[in-house]
Image: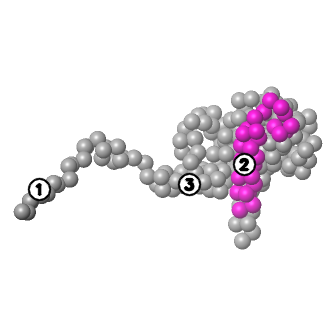
């Protein structure tokens, strides 16, 4: 007694299933586009005769919005050009959002990270205005200076702030680690940039 099993064809998937994936951003393409935009921005800034380019670079997050920059660069690898630019603009936005708090944290870390303090190049005493001036000067270096120096200076600044945060009882450990990681990422990228320049 054999019973014939009826063969069932797979049910067609709902159109909504495919709609969910069609047009979804390919992470590899997004990363490539982010890096290409970063390269073009840096190359354009360095080869331009326009003296206002450096100032436009400094204020890019102000004019375009940090959200727009995040959408393009925030998922990029820390050692990519796009990832470096994201971290630099994030640092500047944070300094401008809370200059007094940043000054307090930097002041608290100055004596604990002497070498980093010197590399960061913040005027003494490091008040809110001095910190805003320093972070803007760092970003101007994208157009005019060596990119490795820009990254290493920003990394040093982050290290001093991380050291300061570690001494303040009202700063959570997660915030200390976050700033320390940011400093380490920028420093590693700066050393890679130096190595590629010397190769």
Crowd rating for badge 2 (residues with CA inside 10 Å; few <14, some 14–19, many 20+) = some
Mark 2 → mark 1, Cα distance in angstroms? 60 Å
Residue hosting label 3? 35
Left or right placement of residue 35 versus residue 3 in this view: right
- Say which residue appears at 59% left-offset and 34% top-offset: 65
Q: For this rendering, which residue is in front, 73 or 174?
A: 174
Mark 3 and mark 1 in contact? Answer it, CB < 8 Å: no
Cα–Cα span, label 2 and label 3: 21 Å
Foreground label between 2 and 3: 2
Q: Are marks 2 and 1 in contact (CB under 8 Å)?
A: no
Q: In the rendered structure, which disc, 2 or 1, sits on the residue that comes first in sequence?
A: 1
Is 145 or 120 nearer to us in this picture? 120
Q: Residues within 10 Å of mark 3 (few under 14, many from 20)?
A: many
Q: Secondary structure at mark 3?
A: helix
Residue 153 highlighted magenta (yes or no):
no
Q: Which mark is residue 181?
A: 2
Mark sitting earlier along the chain (2/3)? 3
Where does the image place residue 131, in percent across and percent down from the top left? 81, 36
User: With 11 as the anchor, is 108 left or right in this view?
Assistant: right
Relative to 189, 39 lies left or right: left
Q: Pointer 1: what residue?
A: 6
- Say left or right for 137 vs 38: right
Which sits earlier in the primary sequence, circle 3 or circle 1? 1
Point out residue 42 in the picture as x, y percentages from the top left corner: 63, 52
Residue range (magenta): 164-192
Q: Indicate which label's residue lies in the foreground, 3 or 1.
A: 1
Q: Quadrant of the N terminus?
A: bottom left
């Amino acid at each position: 007694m054999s019973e014939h099993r009826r063969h069932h064809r797979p049910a067609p998937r709902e159109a909504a299933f495919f709609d969910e994936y069609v047009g979804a951003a390919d992470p590899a393409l997004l990363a490539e586009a982010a890096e290409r935009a970063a390269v073009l921005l840096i190359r354009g800034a360095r080869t331009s005769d326009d003296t206002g380019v450096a100032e436009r670079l400094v204020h890019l997050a102000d004019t375009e919005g940090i959200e727009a920059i995040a959408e393009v660069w925030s998922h990029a690898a820390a050692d990519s050009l796009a990832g470096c630019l994201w971290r630099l603009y994030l640092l500047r936005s944070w300094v401008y959002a809370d200059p007094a708090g940043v000054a307090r944290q930097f002041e608290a870390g100055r004596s604990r990270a002497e070498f980093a303090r010197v590399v960061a190049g913040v005027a003494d005493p490091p008040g809110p205005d001095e910190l805003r001036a320093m972070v803007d000067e760092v970003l101007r270096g994208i157009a005019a200076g060596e990119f490795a120096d820009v990254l290493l200076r920003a990394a040093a600044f982050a290290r001093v702030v991380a050291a300061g945060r570690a001494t303040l009882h009202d700063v959570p450990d997660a915030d200390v680690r976050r700033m320390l990681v940011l400093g380490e990422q920028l420093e590693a990228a700066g050393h890679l940039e130096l190595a590629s320049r010397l190769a």
